[in-house]
Image (cartoon, rainbow, N blue to C red):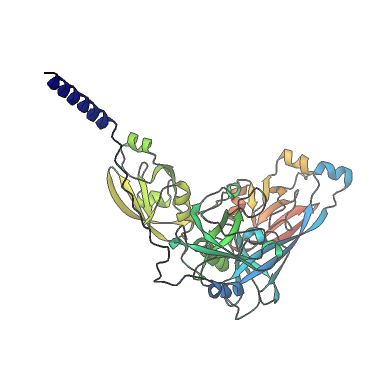
Amino acid sequence: MKLKILLHGLALVLTALLLAGAKEAPPPKPVLKIDLSPLNDGKSAPVVSYADVVEPVQKAVVSIYSSKTVRHHLPPSFQQLFGDDDHESREEGLGSGVIVSPNGYILTNNHVVEGADELKVALADDREFKGRIIGTDPKTDVAVIKIEADNLPTITLADSDRLRVGDVVFAVGNPLDIGETVTAGIVSAKGRRVHLLDDINGYEDFIQTDAAINLGNSGGALVDARGRLVGINSAIMSTTNGSMGIGFAVPINLASSVMQSLIATGTVARGYLGVGVDPLTPELAEAMGKDAKGMVISTVTPDSPAAKAGLKQEDVIVAINGRPVDSLEGLRMIIAQTAPGTKVKVKYLREGKMAELEVTLTKLADDSGKPDEFVTGVTVAQVDDDARRTFRLPDEVDGLVVTDVADTSPFRERFRPGMVIVQVNRAPVDDVAGARAQLRPGRNFCRVWERGSYRYVPFKNGE
């Protein structure tokens, strides 16, 4: 009997122990995907040098030395005390550029040449040439200059849309004027918008790289592992003005389209669709009963290309010419890169069904984002009683008075505060929109009043 009781008690203890063990059993092990093979399995030789790739690129990269006279204007109240003499100083600048054609066309940044009176271009073989500005586009920070030479070394352009994060890239330029330098890295990100051009309503679609970029590299080449041009180095993000491994380049597809327009017309003609859009957030999609990724149309401008093609409010734009649309900046970039007159295919969602239609883009009339700007950096206002008192204008003078000229404006040698623009290309003007409407690509002229007399001011739109 005692033996039975002991055996029964032992069974209870064992059962309790088993149950306790079952409760505290370890969780199942994770299923890991492991590859313990060496990075180089011996089937391909390790890359020990990119010299053969970089050497021809170096021959096509140039140094650009700029100089400009900065004129400091005294406000009218100070002119009464100290006279109206202007104060001038000389500023020097340094940047890089890339030869893209044997006859001397060079791609660089707008900020490298903006406002320059003189440009000196130094080639890798130590030859020097005088540079001439063909055109600039502040909104993308792209510029084209030209030197008078033939049979120059050039660089091959790649398709920057095919770049992938992790691709090996090289930055080539003249940092800090120490001489042509090559740095290596990878593509860190694509499609970066870092708000560098927000003040001029610009277009940003930067390639981010950790290849070291410093002052002087601007305008230089970002090339892939085959030595093809994928971007124009433009900016760095830094707390020290030195490289911190966060550099940005304008994709060559964007820079090339801007270049072609600048060479052809001296300015950049951008496409116009005519819609206002908002992101289709998950909350908005649920509220509107829509199942898609894209931008929902909030407004359609009457008589715009979108309206004529049949796009409607609450349509969701999913893609344009097969390129997905997932942000306002992305949509704006796609349309702006497309030449006016081009037909684009717009894929959209309406009432739960996907559809596609063709839209013929027209020209974007004004994209400056500065309603008081006549041309880049030149701010104007209608001549009224306040303007007459401020600038001491006679009653018989009407038109647009120049109120400010930025030091960085390419037109600062042509226009000055207090000058009154009376006509643009022989057409009388009395408002900013009307004055801008009279501008044409290339050569223009204004009839102006200044200091008691009328005269003509010639200038190049896009200079």
Q: Is residue 315 left or right of residue 428?
A: left
| Residue 69 figure quarter | bottom right
| Residue at the outermost front position | 2
The x, y position of residue 137, in whole percent, is 59, 59
| Residue lying farthest to the left in this orientation | 1
Q: Quadrant of the C terminus?
A: bottom right
At x 70%, y 59%, the residue is 115
In percent of width and height, residue 81 lies at: 88, 43
**Nearest the eye: 154 or 187:** 187
Q: How many marks?
A: 0
Q: On the rendered structure, is 335 left or right of 71?
A: left
Residue extending farthest right: 82
Q: Position of residue 61 (x, y in %)?
A: 61, 70
Image location of residue 349, percent across then percent down? 32, 46
Q: Nearer the viewer, residue 288 or 223?
A: 223
In the rendered image, is residue 154 in sight? no
The quarter of the picture where residue 44 lies is bottom left
Report the front residue among 88 and 306.
88
Which quadrant of the rendered structure holds the N terminus? top left
Q: Is residue 416 above or below residue 11?
A: below
- Can residue 353 be seen here? yes
Q: Nearer the viewer, residue 104 or 385?
A: 104
For the point 77% across and 39% down, the residue is 389
Furthest residue in direction top, as rendered: 1
Left or right of residue 105: residue 66: right
